Amino acid sequence: MDTRKAVANRLIALCGQRGWTIHKLATVSAVSPSTVKSILYGNSQNPGIVTIKMLCDGLEISLEEFFSGEEFADLEQEIK
């Protein structure tokens, strides 16, 4: 799995745990719904760390908690 897909999967899992929609995540994070959708549907190939931090703030978790998900344990090499 690549990093972009791992970020999307982690966000989907966290929203699922909370019973949140994409729109709810966007609203509580002060990130536009189009940006969240772009990350989740693969249109954003490199979501910025500031955006990920804002999403974490909305989810009330730290960046450390976000990246501790199992999705990030076995990432593919990005430089090929």
Image (cartoon, grey):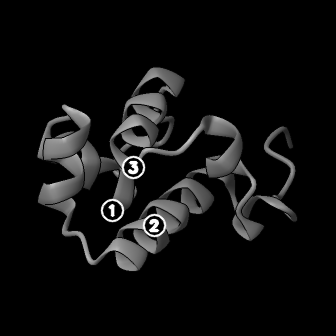
Q: Residue at label 3?
A: 59
Q: Residue furthest top?
A: 50
Q: Which amino acid does label 2 sit on?
A: Leu
Task: Pick whichever, 1 or 68, lies toward us.
Answer: 68
Q: What residue type is labelled 3?
A: Leu
Which is more foreground, mark 3 or mark 1? 3
**Disc 1 packing (10 Å; few <14; some 14–19; many ≥20):** few
Q: Is residue 14 left or right of residue 40?
A: right
**Badges 2 and 3: C-beta atoms under 8 Å apart?**
yes
Quadrant (top left, top right, bottom left, bottom right) of the N terminus: bottom right
Residue drawn at 13 percent across, 44 percent down: 27
- Residue 9 vertical position relative to residue 77 in the rendered view, above or below: below
Q: Is residue 56 left or right of residue 1?
A: left
Cα–Cα span, label 3 and label 1? 19 Å
Q: Earlier in the sequence, mark 2 or mark 3?
A: 2
Q: Which of marks 1 and 2 is nearer the N terminus?
A: 2
Q: Earlier in the sequence, mark 3 or mark 1?
A: 1
**Disc 3 packing (10 Å; few <14; some 14–19; many ≥20):** some
Q: What residue type is labelled 1?
A: Tyr
**Disc 2 packing (10 Å; few <14; some 14–19; many ≥20):** some
- Residue 72 vertical position relative to residue 12 in the rendered view, above or below: above
Residue drawn at 86 percent across, 43 percent down: 80
Q: In this view, does 67 lie to the left or right of 75?
A: left
Q: In this view, does 24 lie to the left or right of 48?
A: left
Q: Residue at label 1?
A: 41
- Residue 10 vertical position relative to residue 58 in the rendered view, above or below: below
Residue drawn at 20 percent across, 62 percent down: 22
Percent across and percent down for residue 23 are: 12, 57
**Badges 3 and 1: C-beta atoms under 8 Å apart?**
no
Task: Pick whichever, 31 or 28, lies toward us.
Answer: 28
Q: Residue at label 2?
A: 14
